Image (cartoon, coloured by chain):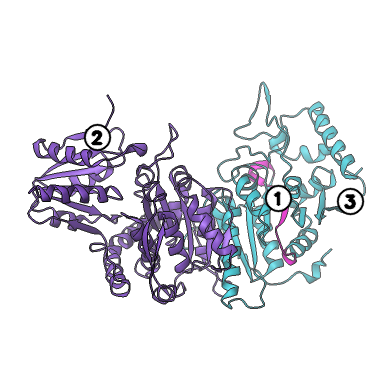
Chain colours: A cyan, B purple
Amino acid sequence: MMDKKQFPREEYFAPGHRGCAGCGASIVARMALKTTGRDTIVVNSTSCLEVFTTPYPESAWRVPWIHTAFECGGAVASGIERAIKALKKRGKYKDRKLVVMPIIGDGGTADIGFQALSGALERGHDIVYIMYDNEAYMNTGVQRSSSTPLFASATTAPAGKVSKGEDNPKKDMAMIAAAHGIPYVATACISYPEDFMRKVKKASDIEGPTFIHVLQPCTIGWGYSTENTIKIGRLAVETGLFPLYEIENGEFKITYKPAKRKPLKEYIRMQKRYRHLTDEDIEILQKHIDEKCRLLGLE
Amino acid sequence: MEKIDIITGTTAAAMAAKLSNVEVIAAYPITPQSHCVEALAKYVADGELDAEFVKVESEHSAMATCIGASATGVRTFTATASQGLALMHEMLYIASGMRLPIVMLNTNRALSAPINIWCDQQDSIAERDSGWIQIYAEDNQETLDSVVQAFKIAEDEEVLLPVMVNIDGFILTHTVEPVAIPDEEKVREYLGIYEPKHAYLDPDRPITQGPVGVPECYMETRKDLNDAIEGSREVIKRVNEEYYKLFNRKYGNGLVEGYNLEDADTVLVAMGSVCGTIKYVINELKEKGKNVGLLRIRTYRPFPKEDVVEMLKDANNVAVLDKNISLGFNMGALGIDVSSVLKNKKVCNYIVGLGGRDITPQDIEEIISHVEGAKDGETKWINLKE
C-alpha cells in the first residue's frame, strides 16, 4: 500500500467547489488526481461531479477537463486518447505519458454510458476509467440505477406498503469490465485511500484500458449525517458487502481482507435508504453477501 | 497535377478527407455512407493516410469521439446518414456549442418508419437548427471540393463551427462520375495543419471545456453561436473564391448558385442532386424558347437570405422543391424559409422524391406549368400515387 506520508502534496482538484458537506465523489476526484498529477485529462459525464465543479465561470479542475453529455464518456475519452497519439506523431508531448481519465458515475457507466464504455474497453484505448459509484442518480434526486443495491429505497424504486425498494441486485460492473479481457480491473473505496491511490497509480502506468470501480457513500442519497462518509465506506468493506480486489492480466487478487467480517446490520442501520428493512430482510441481504464472500475467498 | 478518376460520391468524400490530412476518423457503417469510411479504412490500412481510425460502436459514439479528438486539437472527420444522424442529434448541438470544427459527410437518406434506405433530405433538415453549417452538393466533384472547403471554413478563427456536407443517398453515393482529384500537396498546403488557438485540452494550459452554462451566461453563448454562423457567410464566400484561384472550380458565390436567372419569370429553388435534373430541363425548354431559371441553395445554414431576395427579385413564379416535409405544416423546410424571406411574391412548394421516389424531367416540367397557373402559397406533392 501507498504510505500516507508519501501522498503527493499537490492538489489538482481545487477546494471551494459546490459539493455537499461529506461528499464522497469529490474525494474520488481529489485522490485520483493527486495520484496521476498534472499530465492528466479528465472526462466527466453529466453528473453531480460535473455540476458542482464547473458552474461557469468557476472550475475546480486544475487539469484539462471536458464534459459533453451523459452516455458518451468512453467515446469522448477514446477520441482524446487517439488525438494524443496523433499529436505525438507531430512531435507534441514527446516522452510524456498523458493519462486520459474518465471519472464517471454509476448511471453514466452502468446504464446510459454502458455501450460507450464497452466500446472503449474493447478497442483497447489507453485510458484509466474510474466509475464513481454512489449507487443511484444522486444529481437528479436519488433515482435508482442498475448499481442500486437490493432493498435500497430510491425515488424511482421507493419502499412502500408493498415494496421493499429496489427489487434487483446491484450490477457487477467490475466483473463486466473484466470480461472485456482488459489488462487491469480493480474495486476500491474512498475509505481506503492508500489502496485506491495505489490502484490508480498502477492503472495509469499500464498501457491499455483499465477500469476502477470505486465506492463512495453519498450523504443525501444514502441518508446519514455528513461526518460519517468515511465510516460508512469502511463498513461497506469490513462487512464484505464491497470487497476490494484487483484483476491484473486475468489474475484475481483480494487486496484487503477484513480480519473478521462485521455484521451487515451495522452498515444497514446507519442509512435511511434502508430504514424500512426488518431484521428478516437484513438476514436475506446477509446471506447474499456471505455467498459472494465465499465465492471470492473472503470468508 | 490534377488527375481525373471515375468515382462515387462517397469515394470522393473519402478522398477529400485524405487530401485534407485528417488525423482522427471515427467510423460506424450505415447505408448509403459505408463506402466512405471503408475507403478511409483502406487508405489507413495501406499506409496512404496516417490517421487514427476509431472503429466506434455507434454514430453517437462516432460524434462523441470526434468531439473528444477535436477538443484535443486535431482535424477530425466522420460520415453518417439518416438514423445515424438522428442518433447523433444530441452530440451535434454539443459539437457546435463547443465550437469544434468537425467535418462530416451526411449521405441524405429518409428517416424511419417505415425503414427506407433511399434518398430524401429529412435527416439533415431535422438537424437544421443544430448550429452546423450545412452544404448540399450537386454532384461528386462538388462533394470532393466541398469537403476540402469544409475544413477551411470550419477551422477559420472567425467561424469555428462544425460543417456537414450533404450528398443525396444513392443518387450521388452510388453513382460514378468523373471527378478531378486535386494535387495532395496543394490541398495540404492550402489547409495547413490544424492548430487551434482557442480552448483545447492541453496539460500545459489546463482549461475546463463544457462547463455548466448557468442562466446568467447561457443565452450569451447562444448569441455568440448565432453570430458565428451568421458571420460564416463571408468566410464561405471567401473560401469559394480562394478555392477557385487554386483549383479552378467554384460553386456560385459559395452560398447560392444561379442558373439561367436572367429574364426568367419562373424560377425553381432546390438543393442537391435534383438541381442537375432541373438544369437539364431548363436547357431543353430554352431550346423551345421558354426561359426558366434555377436558384440552387448550396449552403442551407447559414441561409443565404439576401441572395435569395436579390436573385429572385425579377421572378414572378417561385417554385420551391423540398425533399422533406414539415409534418403538420404541409410544407418543406426550404419552402418555409424561402416564403419567409420573399415578400409579395408568389411562392409555391413542391414535395418531391421522399424515400427515393424518382424525380423525373417530366416531374420538373409539371412543377413549372403548375406554378405558372397557381396561387401563392400552394403546396403540391409530386409523383404521388393515387
The percent coordinates of residue A47 (x first, y second) are 57, 50
Residue A19 visible somewhere in the drawing: no
Residue B381 image label:
none
Q: Secondary structure at mark 3?
A: loop
Does the stretch in magenta take in A30? no
Q: CA distance from mark 1 to mark 2?
A: 61 Å
Pick the quarter of the image with the C terminus of chain B: top left
Q: CA distance from mark 1 to mark 3?
A: 19 Å
Q: Secondary structure at mark 2?
A: loop
The percent coordinates of residue A33 (x first, y second) are 67, 65
Residue situated in front as seen by the camera: A203 or B264 = B264
The percent coordinates of residue A113 (x first, y second) are 60, 47
Q: What residue would you read off at disc 1?
A: A216
Alpha-carbon neighbours of circle 1 within 10 Å: few (<14), some, or many (≥20)? Answer: many
Subunit ID for the residue under disc 3: A
Q: Amino acid at mark 1?
A: Gln
Residue A104 visible somewhere in the drawing: yes
Determine the residue located farthest toward the top in the rendered image. Answer: A162
Residue A257 image label:
3
Q: CA distance from mark 3 to mark 2?
A: 75 Å
Subunit ID for the residue under disc 2: B
Q: Is residue B252 above or below residue B33?
A: below
Whether label 1 touches label 2, CB < 8 Å: no
Q: Amino acid at mark 3?
A: Lys
Taking B292 as reference, is A164 left or right? right
Alpha-carbon neighbours of circle 2 within 10 Å: few (<14), some, or many (≥20)? Answer: some
Whichever of callouts 1 and 3 sits on the residue coming sooner in the sequence is 1
Q: What residue would you read off at disc 2?
A: B382
Which portion, as a residue range, is magenta? A204-224
Q: Is residue B132 above or below residue B353?
A: below
Name which residue lies at 41% across and 38% down.
B111
Name which residue lies at 67% across and 77% down.
A95
